[in-house]
Image: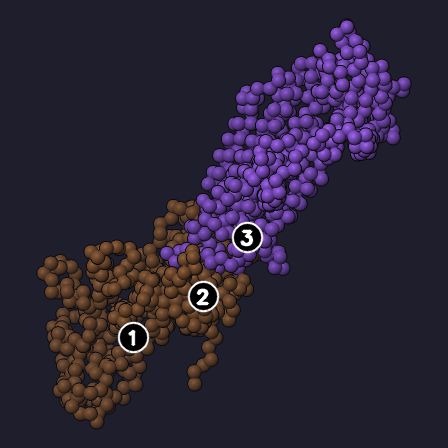
Chain colours: A brown, B purple
Amino acid sequence: MAEERQVVVETVQLSKLFRDFWMRPKVKALDRVEFQVYRGEIFGLLGPNGSGKSTLLKILLGLLFPTTGRAAVFGRDPRNLAIKDRIGFMPEESYLYRYLNAEETLDFYGRLFNLPSAERRHRVELLLEMVGLTHQRKRPIVEYSKGMARRIGLAQALINDPDLIFLDEPTTGLDPTGTREIKDLILELRRRGKTVLLCSHLLADVEDVCDRVAILYGGRLRRLGSVDELLSLRAKTQITTDRLNAETIEQVVNRIHELAGPAMEVSVQTPRDRLENFFLHVVEEARAARLETSGVTVGAKPSDFFSGIAREQKADVILEELLKTTAERTVEQKESPDREEQPVVVPLQQEPKSDDKLISGLLKESIPSAAARTGGASGQRPAAEQQVVLPASGGTGDDSKTTQDVLKDLLSTRKPGSDEENTDKSRTRKTEQ
Amino acid sequence: MDLRRACCQVGTIARQSLLQAVRMKIAVVLVVFMLILVPSLPFLLQSDNTHEGLLRMVITYSIYLISFLLGVLTLFLSAITLNTEIKNQHIFLLDPKPVSRGTLLLGKWCGVMLINLMLLIAMLGATYGLMKYLGRQTKGETQQGHDVVEWEVLSARKVVQPPLPPLDDWVKSEVKDIVANGEVPEGKTPEWVERIVRERLSKAAWVVPPGGVMKWTVSGIPPYKKGALVIRFRHYTDAMLADPVLPGKFTVNAGEQPYSEIEDAFSVGKPHTFGVPSEEIKPNGTVEITYENKYKPQDQNSPPAARAEFPFEDGIQVLYPATTFGENLFLRAGLVIFIRLAFIAIVGIWASTFLSFPVAVLLSLVVFMIGYAADFIFTGLIGQLVIFGPTLVPPWAPINPIDNVLRNVLTYFFLMFPNFSKYDVVPELSDGMIISMWTVFYCFFWLIVVRGGILALTGWLIFKRRELAATTAAT
């Protein structure tokens, strides 16, 4: 039985309609959006430009008001002052006062929370240290780089030790180290029982840290669920083991074919899918359904930025390019002689040379999806693991055997008594080396 | 507890606004500008070649300059302070903090007023220093000239007058006689007659024929030891004099000790002053002033008689120092100017609760200019407004009813705007008169409590319901 979890953020049939000066409807930024964020989770808000993410965030911060429906933070209206004591917000851009220095900035925001002087000074010290700006504390923010301003933006969001933190594109403008630090910090916040609502375009970041994500398009909620749920390929079964050599893999594949039939599609690959693909798939779906959006549009709804037919076509071309999956682009890159100089992402670059041929052979023979082809794009996947992917059912020639049966047979042959351990492993998303 | 918290937040926001003005060099530039301009005033202005006149001009121009410059600065600062928060999206970080919209508005207003206070003190300080310096310069010349400067300008005096005759009764009685005798001119109304009679009689509260003596007892003067008691008078005459002067003699506490007397030919229609030692104030706080009309015809062409007529308003006055020039300038005049600035700041912030910066500034500027031109608008513009009736009519002729309605509508409309001339402190300052606390209170009540209160309330209601991110989200 699922444990009753405390709802921190809730929207019910939330809609937002922007009107022009004459009160004529202009843009429907949100359309009956409904979701909940629970205490202690990291919730990701995704969507292309103009999908309504910012509007949603601003409603939750009390900067905009819903047209219809309801938004609640800690069970209250977002404009309620009492809940604002428990909220931290790091905006996408640096909205800090340029003439203040880092110390004054944190002190200013600390004062707004009425923190006692000693505690305020203590927190300012800690936060400056945490974001690595102790030595730059006296420099006016106008002299800061974007990354430094982002860091101080994050520090101000934490000055009141909030229970709920809104992070809008927290890693934008940060170097890889800073990005890593922010992600670690987000995970640390969760560990401390804080709730984080994260809005980001950097899908890898979202995938790495978020427990659940919501994907918006055209102001409507297209998908909502845990990252695992959304990214799992239900038509496939994945077995993750420690590193296998090519001979073993071949034997495993043969054994699968023996047990499930020769028609069973088997591929060996690194154990990872990318959120980016899923996200783009959702957007593609929405685009195919020709949903209206106030953001970037394609097809019959050209971007307002361009005018005239020629430009509409140009807009379409740009958008098409933007919406192409990474896999499609990778294939194009391979096919195009002009792009030979571009680095082609090859999975398992760090594998031992002796296994490369066999694994590459396996991959060439049975690449199941674009996702699989780009699985190693980030270079983050563990080199010491190997995956076997096969359809969940059907196509085996033996309908009476389920995939689970096949797996059991397989594993009992290779490693008796270790199926439970391996199954657990296959379900574990590893994000670190 | 919440009030204390709100106060702290107001202080924080105000302090931050002040810091902004200082770091952005707004305050520094203005202070430097004024510190250069104020000492330059004596060289830029042309007076009547008297020290007294120069000091009067310096204080007049200096205070008008301070009021105007700070007024314009306040107008811009107040209109920009909130708009900058919104335009630069600082508000996105401020609004999600536990700061109510009202607190934010109040904090911004306090911030503007802190800047104003700082600048006002600096500018008044420069003016005070210059006035004192110019006053000291007169010491090297005649004692009389120095005394006049000290008594007339570098002072803050209160006025007491002898009991005034019943002007209303006089007017009523005379009008009644005119009407009863059928002497009302043809085509003129009794109201017109009353106005003419009142004008005439108000110029002659006390009439002293040649050789005659008038004695006034002025009471209500607090005893003080330092300085001089100033007697100020103005008189007219009913005779057509070739040289408009009337010889006369003033005696203070005649027949008693100590006493003072002054005899001279005093020009007609102009105010005259003379000082007597403060010891002449009697223990009961009174002084007795006697005037003797010493007119005698000089030749055959001279009128046989010339009465001395002392008007009600400033016929005879006794002025005593009520406080110091410094207190008058810094506390009273400063307070009135500060209250006016506070009102302008309310207007600017109120306008920016629903308007963008340029429009808010424009609206504030309109209010500001109407405030300065209110007297002209009411008397010169609305008072003379003729659209539907004939333009060339005698003043006593009844106006067209539609014009009358229009005048009333416009009058009530413009009553919504302040009239800054009602709270003008310059006449008192240049005349060395104390600015009464009643004036300060009156200014505070009408500008801040009534008009400011209405604007603050509506501004708060608008801002509370304003979507601060609407513009960016919609575009």
For discs 3 and 1, the disc positioned in front in the rendered view: 3
Q: Is residue B118 left or right of residue A130?
A: right
Q: Where is residue B322 in the image (x, y as percent from the top left)?
A: 75, 31
Q: Quadrant of residue A243?
A: bottom left
CA neighbours of label 3 inside 10 A, class few (<14), some (14 to 19), many (20+) = many
Q: Can residue A412 be seen in this view?
A: no
Q: Position of residue B87 (x, y in %)?
A: 43, 50
Return the chain for callout 2.
Answer: A
Residue furthest left in the image: A337
Spatial CA distance of label 3 from label 1 is 50 Å
Q: Mark 1, chain letter?
A: A
Contact between labelled residues 2 and 3, with CB atoms less than 8 Å apart: no
| Location of residue B283 by image quarter | top right
Q: Is residue A229 above or below residue B379?
A: below
* Viewer can see residue A228: yes
Residue B274 percent across, percent down from the top left: 76, 19
Q: Residue A231 bears which disc, if any?
A: 1
Q: What element carries label 1?
A: helix
